[in-house]
Image (cartoon, rainbow, N blue to C red):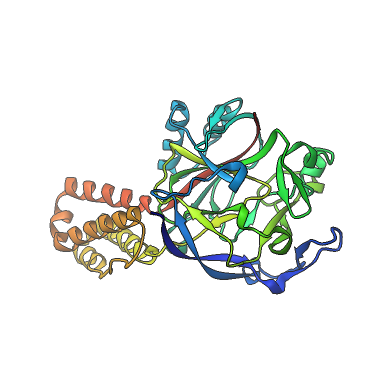
Amino acid sequence: MDTTYPADLAFTRPTEAEACPVRPGLKRVKPRARGVAEAFDFHQCHVTDMVDGDFLPDLFDHGFDTTELTGFDKLQRTLESCRQEAHIEDEDAAVIRSTFEGATLTLASGRSLTVQFVSPDGLVMRKAGPNGHKVCGPMTTMNDHGAATSIHADQDVLGTPLVQVMGGRAPDLFRHHAPDSRNDDGDLLLLNVWIPLDAITRPLVLADSNTLDRRQHQLRYGLQVDEFLDRDEDQQINDIWTFLHHEDQRWYFRSEMKSTSAYVFDTMGTAHGSFILPGEDAAEAAYLALEAAIDALENGDAGALRSASAVNIAPPAITTPPLQTAIEEMVRLLDEAATNAEGLCANSTAASEWTEASRTARSRVERKSIELRIVASTT
């Protein structure tokens, strides 16, 4: 049986939408100078966990699918290194790109894709702490991208940069669904590949494309990308889509997912974003208490260690099993420190073991993921 959770998803406010002056019948987000956050509203939606459910997504029918990556040994070693370091190095990026170039991907729906091209940009690591806690430093081309909070799709088939790169041929070549353009016969697809490293908080949520009213709820939006992508001057605005909320939309995520599998979804039409799970407030409280406790132990201050660890963290009334397990482990470590503060401070081996376990537990609730963009063909 499907399990659903309440989730607050960020949609563009209806007051921010206006008729598009250059594409009749479409809507766009109004030009604005103020902060992006002011243009969004949170709506509580029911998101369905696909781990044990009956819903099996299909890339063509629903806009997203999954693929197994277990057979790519070098890729898995690289992804584990990226997970531990929470960072992508140039050599890691080279392995990731070379793995996917020319690869055949078998989707869970049974479809087969052959990767024809891996985009030179768009390979990024995203990080986010539990309950919206910020863990990123200054954003660079590949690293320290936060979790995408608003519901969006990443590319307009008739927009920048596709119109420049492909000379206006993208709608004829790529299979896609847009408010004013549709191609169900193309053999080429522009796709996002989303690989989780740690993803039990701030998970990716995706819409069933069948439940979107694209003409009414999909809005053109120009995203400024010159701060993190090196593009020609005429391509520094990326034409993407944002979405209005409607109760008919259906949303899906997977609570248990590791780097051995990945989402594959339509870059040009699949609405997606991240969200905060119920229970992430408890995870954040334990995460921050462990941080303070680690600092106290490293300073050899038993009193401060006891104080930092003696916190009352109520178990969440509802959350996913992986997040529940992670919270319980952090609470166990805090209880151990609170009841044995002097012993930990006096025993360097025990202190080292506790600190390592605590850092591992904290890392577990930091969302880390890698995404890249590919062109694939299908038969």
Residue under the point 26% across and 48% down: 357
Quadrant including the N terminus: bottom left
- Residue at the far bottom: name it: 15
Residue 133 sits in quarter: bottom left
Residue 163 rendering spot, x and y as whole percentages: 81, 44
Q: Is residue 325 left or right of residue 262?
A: left
Q: In this view of the protein, which residue sits in the foreground, 270 or 103? A: 270
Q: Is residue 55 left or right of residue 181?
A: left
Residue under the point 71% across and 44% down: 176
Residue under the point 75% across and 55% down: 179
Q: Is residue 102 left or right of residue 276?
A: right
Quadrant including the C terminus: top right
Numbered-mark total: 0
Residue 152 rendering spot, x and y as whole percentages: 63, 56
Residue 249 rendering spot, x and y as whole percentages: 58, 61
Residue under the point 84% across and 58% down: 23
Q: In this view of the protein, which residue sits in the foreground, 67 or 280? A: 67
Residue 2 rendering spot, x and y as whole percentages: 41, 55
